[in-house]
Every structure is written in structure tokens, then in C-alpha cells.
Amino acid sequence: MIKEFSKRFPKAKLTGEIGYDYTHHNARRIKQAAGAHPSRCLNKDLPMQKWICVTCGFIYDEAKGLPDYDVAPGTLFADLPDDWICPECGSTKDCFDLVVE
């Protein structure tokens, strides 16, 4: 799988077990390959979204991120690690729903 990834994204460099260091022109393709929403990767003009924890009501705002937890502003919910948990109650990502305004 790593060889296939390296062939598809020759300028990407594996930085460890998790994550990639990549050049700006391969960033979109790498995010798509990693499972991020393709429409959000290709169109940066889409508004940031909010996600609510159905367990406790905590709202994750992509525009604000969570600086106290090392999540930079502008981080898409899809780009949070799979093992990310709600900072309020410890629920997993699958316990969050998109907030429709």
C-alpha cells in the first residue's frame, strides 16, 4: 500500500506511522485519498461547518478549531484523527452530527 501511495503521490513523504508531509500541489489529491470529502478539498470557498455531539451537546466549529487541544482553526471535522474524542464527554467522532442552520 505504501508503494502504491508513493507512486500516486511522488512528492509526498511519509512522516511516521500516521500523517504525511506533502507539497502544496499534491495536498488536494492526498486529502482525497485519505478519505476527506472531495468537494470540500477542491472548493475551499465552502463555508466552515459545525458539528454537534449528540451525547452532550458540545459543538465543534471548524472555523474556530480547538486551540486548547492543538486543533488549528480551519480544521475540517473530516480531517480530525479517527481516534479524536469529544473534549466534553469523551464520545467518539461517530457520535457527532452536522449542524444544519
Image: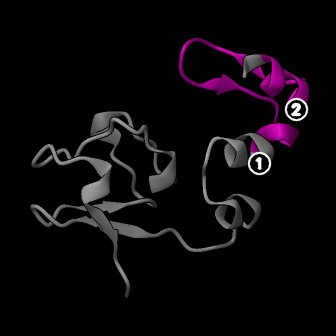
Give the farthest residue toward the bottom.
101
Residue shown at 61% from the left, 48% from the top: 35
| Distance CA(mark 2)–CA(mark 1) | 13 Å
> What segment is highlighted magenta in the picture?
3-27
Q: Quadrant of the N terminus?
A: top right
At label 1, counting other C-alpha atoms closer than 10 Å, the crowd grade (few under 14, some 14-19, many 20 or more) is some
Residue shown at 39% from the left, 51% from the top: 65
What residue is shown with label 1? 28
Residue 59: image quadrant is bottom left
Looking at the rendered structure, the kind of residue marked 1 is Arg
Give the farthest residue toward the front.
1
Residue shown at 66% from the left, 25% from the top: 20
Q: Is residue 47 above or below residue 85?
A: below
On residue 8, the disc is 2
- Tell me, yes or no, whether the two marked residues, 2 and 1, touch with CB atoms within 8 Å: no
Local SS, label 1: helix
Closest to the observer: 35 or 81?
Answer: 35
Q: Is residue 41 above or below residue 29?
A: below
Give the image location of residue 74, x and y in percent.
52, 54
Residue 80: image quadrant is top left
Look at the image and say whether residue 80 sits in the magenta stretch.
Answer: no
The disc, 2 or 1, on the residue closer to the chain's N-terminal end is 2
